[in-house]
């Protein structure tokens, strides 16, 4: 009889971004916002995995300021599980640190890496896939990743090229061999990927056994392996200074680039569980409850002769008259009104604010 | 040599309205809002007349709650000049009371009646017209009114039909005999008025000598004359109770209906001084400073690819992206976003709020 795998969930909560400006600010990026529900996205991420992973084995990794927010948002997660990266250096250093932390508890522990700012609507399917992948990670020497079946030729995601043939079943779920990781492609190349039919979007979700991660790193990421050892030692010794020193020197690379695309024996599981990266205000139009005319309004509202308007103005009244395809976001000090298909221009707004010495609004 | 007329200005500050919702609320109608400048409209009205009328001869008439606001807004006007109407009963009762108050000081005093919620951009022309009309009112037995040359067939104003021939000049300014006052017309009739070319819009501005007002009332408004006498006595005796009793019984009619359209010897002066009744948000698009693309924004702003947007969001940042012909008004508890040509639908919004038990937003 197989031993039940010892699963540890590492929630990547260190991201920053302003695509949800003016709601998202430098200090409160997307994962700290209640944009997909009444809870913040990081809370939703934790709640989603809890049936499979108890609080004591849930970790977050983020910077110090973000960790103070996490402590408030996640009172159930032990404070010692809220890992603080000494310096923001992309995902490889953070995941080496988090995996080393799990390794110290149990080298055969399974690490489930979850971004904190994605939406997954089919929780049951998600948990089934995670459980199957954890079981596979427990029994094989494989790094496992999740691929999202692409629905359009996005140039905003990385892609995973996989071998359609030779599907392996584990706990009844199919796994594919990864042929290559592809960085964000051009439009033309993305269209080629979709036509080819053997590409997934890279979800940034990973599963590995701590000892397998260490061995793969030793073999495929020799530049990083010394840092693995240093971090392991620093964490074992409880030395913040040595951890910080390792973070100073380690290259700032993504785990995809540092390890996944170099390693052999990477498997991908099809992430068919209602995934969305919730990349911009307009993506919420698919997520929030809408009225018959496609209007989604957070807050009290009176809507006349309007359709396909997305409005975030909780705790206040919004009256919409004669509108169409707009995004409206009202916060304490800033109001955004934006044509829905131009939401990528919010970046320009932020650049102008910076240039005009009004960075306080960012 | 003619004696310099003893001019008293009565500012009608008792109006209520919600056309500037959500900025205007039940307790803060248009005249109390800083919508045409950084000062409230009633402050602007007082400042406009001050070169001709000292503070000691400036009066307001409004209800008790409004008068408390006026006291704060108009510290230069003596408190005893802030007349409180015991009950809101349209303009005839208020103007009888205010004129009686002036009559007690000087029966030959000239009363200039000014609405507090209109904009006049050419102050010099305005003062010249008022001075000439005051001189005329001082020397003739005439009630004088101001007519605005109509620029479109409005169905929202009353009209003054005047005799184009037989213009009389007083202090160099032309005055016309009034043939008739016309209530708000249908579209068709309004178009006829414009074609005829001998109609003005009724501005609600009047000038009369107190004693002439009393005599005209005795002759042409016999239903109201007893109330004139009762109010005069009540004010003389300082009896609030008797004043209130008169207000209880007096018919609630406009001064136009009660007196002006019945009286003979009414003159009209052409109000060519940049008048606007500032009737709705869209009318401010003509008044506020605009950028090259016709956008007028109150408050900090970043505007991209937008034109002809009117936005009121002072003290906050507004970012507009890809918009056209919108009205945006953001207040403490309510946000209105409305297509510019549909601003009359704000009334419907208020009706819905009332029906839904959300009158707190009104």
Image (spheres, coloured by chain):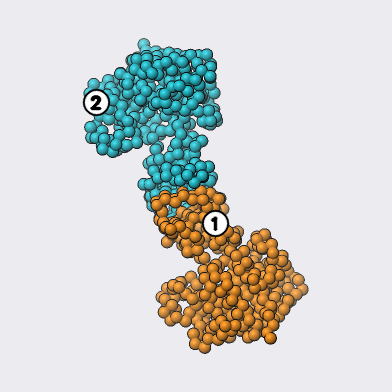
Chain colours: A orange, B cyan
Q: Place residue B278 in its image quadrant.
A: top left
SS label for mark 1:
loop
B73 shown above or below B298: above
Q: Distance between the residues labelled 1 and 2?
A: 61 Å
The numbered mark at residue B105 is none
State whether residue B230 appears in this view.
yes
B222 vs A355: above or below: above
Packing grade of label 1 (10 A; few <14, some 14-19, many >=20) is many
Decide: marks 1, 2 in contact (CB < 8 A)? no
* Residue A227 coordinates in the image, percent (x, y): 67, 77
Task: Return the residue at label 1.
Answer: A23
The residue depicted at 28 percent of the width and 20 percent of the height is B169
Residue B127 lies, in percent from the top left, at 39, 26
Residue A331, image x, y percentages: 54, 52
Residue located 56% across and 53% down the image? A360
The residue beneath circle 2 is B164
Q: In this view of the protein, can residue B174 be seen by the observer? A: no
Quick check: A19 left or right of A191? right
Same chain assignment for discs 1 and 2: no
């Amino acid at each position: 009889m197989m031993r039940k795998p010892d699963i540890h969930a590492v929630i990547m909560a260190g991201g920053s971004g302003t695509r949800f400006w003016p709601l998202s600010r430098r200090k409160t990026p997307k994962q700290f916002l209640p944009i997909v529900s009444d809870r913040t996205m990081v809370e939703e991420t934790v709640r989603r995995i809890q049936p499979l992973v108890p609080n004591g084995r849930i970790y977050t990794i983020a910077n110090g300021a973000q960790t103070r927010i996490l402590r408030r948002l996640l009172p159930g997660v032990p404070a010692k599980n809220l890992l603080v990266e000494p310096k923001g250096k992309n995902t490889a250093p953070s995941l080496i640190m988090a995996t080393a932390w799990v390794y110290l508890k149990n080298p055969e522990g399974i690490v489930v890496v979850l971004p904190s700012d994605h939406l997954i609507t089919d929780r049951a399917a998600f948990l089934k896939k995670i459980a199957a992948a954890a079981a596979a990670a427990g029994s094989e020497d494989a790094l496992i990743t999740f691929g999202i079946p692409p629905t359009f030729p996005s140039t905003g995601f990385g892609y995973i090229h996989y071998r359609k043939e030779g599907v392996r079943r584990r706990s009844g779920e199919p796994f594919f061999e990864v042929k290559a990781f592809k960085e964000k492609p051009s439009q033309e190349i993305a269209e080629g990927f979709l036509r080819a039919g053997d590409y997934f979007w890279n979800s940034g979700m990973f599963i590995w056994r701590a000892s397998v991660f260490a061995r793969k790193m030793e073999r495929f990421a020799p530049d990083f392996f010394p840092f693995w050892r240093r971090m392991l030692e620093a964490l074992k010794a409880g030395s913040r200074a040595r951890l910080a020193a390792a973070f100073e020197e380690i290259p700032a690379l993504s785990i995809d680039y540092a390890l996944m695309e170099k390693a052999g024996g990477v498997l991908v599981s099809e992430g068919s569980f209602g995934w969305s990266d919730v990349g911009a205000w307009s993506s919420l139009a698919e997520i929030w409850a809408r009225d018959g005319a496609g209007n989604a309004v957070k807050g009290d509202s009176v809507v006349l002769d309007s359709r396909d308007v997305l409005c975030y103005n909780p705790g206040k009244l919004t009256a919409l008259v004669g509108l169409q395809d707009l995004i409206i976001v009202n916060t304490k000090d800033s109001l955004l009104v934006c044509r829905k298909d131009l939401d990528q221009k919010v970046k320009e707004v932020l650049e102008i604010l910076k240039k005009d010495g009004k960075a306080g609004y960012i």
